Image: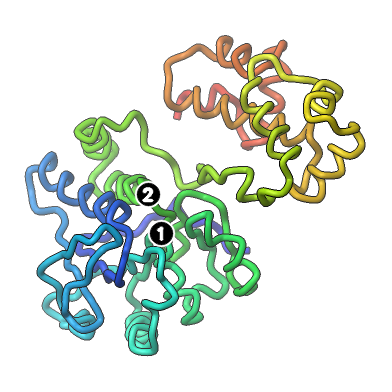
């Protein structure tokens, strides 16, 4: 599988956003506002952006708002004003918005060596054109499972955003803000990115390897009520973890049946899932608060600093102290 390539972020200054009918406004605005604020706090025109539609006629977002002005998509290759990257902005009706003309233009852009990306469901336009084969990719969790089955040549990840060589894909909602902040930090420095996050009253910049929060009922299906309840009990009891016996009793299943359900639907044992859940909570605390490692150890249900450090290193590849220094 190709590497995530987030260590070698691209140096992009001109962004082209392809808006498809009923695109997600929050995903689009989260991305473009970071660029605007980078120019403001950086006191220079570091970034610029263009909005494209397939025919140059502005389209409405899913909230009914129409963006103006818009350029025709076939204008993207004008040498004097060519964007460094074209990012497809999708929404609820992404399949209806992807037609032969859009696919042709995206393939033409790829042939010219342009960076390509997708916000929310916009990655589907690249995936269906075969432009993500062999790449790592992420999409909104509602579409992840279906696309994974439909396009086996694409390496899907449940991360907030993925930058793999000349492809940028990002989930929906506020995640494009994190993607753009990472790009800004690479190009203008972490201080500028931090100033932007302060302007937006954002506590921390999330990383690309942060998992998008996928509701457990979406992972396993609404019919698995006992499994969903078991996970919610785990989430509610981080500092004092429940035993497998207690979990099974509370959801009225045998321990063996509960273990089998976790293995079938979540791919791991209840013990492993619970441990991973507690370690992710610990990582969030280390990244977003000034709490001591000793406090985090206790708050996440570990009775020994040695056990916590060993489990953390196994899960994330480095010690909790390394996370805090970063």
Residue 127 horizontal side relative to residue 110, left or right: right
**Labels 2 and 1 touching (C-beta < 8 A):** yes
Q: CA distance from mark 2 to mark 1?
A: 7 Å
Residue that carries the numbered disc 2 in the rendered image: 173
Q: Percent from the top left, x then y, of residue 208?
A: 46, 47
The image shows residue 132 at horizontal and vertical percentages of 50, 73
Residue at 63 percent of width and 11 percent of height: 298
The residue sitting at 15% across, 77% down in the picture is 71
Answer few, some or many: residues within 10 Å of disc 1's Cα (few below 14, many 20 plus, some between 14 and 19).
many
Q: Which residue is mark 1?
A: 120
Q: Earlier in the sequence, mark 2 or mark 1?
A: 1
221 sits to left or right of 272: left
With 274 as the anchor, is 24 left or right in this view? left
Vertical position of residue 158 compared to residue 84: above or below: above
Q: Residues within 10 Å of mark 2 (few under 14, many from 20)?
A: some
Query: Would residue 152 be found to the left or right of residue 200 on screen?
Result: right
Q: Position of residue 270 (x, y in %)?
A: 78, 35
| Residue 149 vertical position relative to residue 186 in the rendered view, above or below | below
């Amino acid at each position: 599988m190709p590497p995530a390539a987030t260590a070698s972020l691209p140096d992009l200054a001109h962004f082209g956003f392809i808006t498809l009918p009923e695109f997600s406004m929050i995903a689009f605005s989260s991305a473009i506002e970071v660029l605007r604020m980078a120019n403001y706090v950086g006191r220079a025109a570091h970034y610029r952006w263009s909005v494209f539609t397939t025919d140059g006629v502005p389209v409405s977002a899913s909230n009914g708002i129409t963006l103006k002005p818009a350029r025709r998509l076939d204008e993207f290759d004008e040498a004097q004003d060519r964007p460094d990257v074209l990012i497809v902005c999708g929404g609820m009706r992404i399949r209806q918005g992807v037609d032969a003309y859009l696919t042709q233009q995206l393939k033409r852009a790829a042939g010219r060596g342009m960076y390509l990306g997708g916000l929310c469901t916009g990655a589907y336009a690249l995936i269906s054109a075969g432009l993500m084969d062999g790449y790592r990719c992420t999409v909104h969790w509602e579409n992840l499972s279906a696309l994974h089955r439909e396009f086996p040549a694409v390496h899907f990840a449940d991360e907030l955003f993925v930058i793999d060589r000349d492809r940028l894909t990002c989930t929906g909602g506020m995640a494009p803000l994190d993607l753009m902040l990472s790009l800004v930090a690479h190009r203008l420095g972490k201080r500028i990115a931090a100033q932007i996050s302060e302007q937006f009253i954002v506590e921390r910049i999330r990383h690309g390897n942060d998992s998008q929060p996928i509701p457990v009922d979406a992972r396993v299906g609404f019919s698995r009520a006992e499994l969903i309840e078991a996970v919610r009990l785990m989430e509610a009891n981080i500092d004092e973890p429940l035993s497998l016996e207690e979990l099974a009793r509370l959801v009225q299943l045998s321990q063996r049946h509960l273990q089998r359900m976790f293995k079938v639907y979540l791919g791991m044992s209840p013990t492993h899932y619970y441990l991973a859940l507690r370690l992710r909570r610990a990582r969030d605390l280390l990244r977003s608060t000034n709490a001591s490692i000793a406090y985090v150890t206790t708050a996440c249900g570990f009775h020994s600093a040695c056990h916590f450090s060993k489990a953390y290193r196994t899960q994330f590849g480095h010690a909790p102290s390394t996370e805090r220094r970063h």
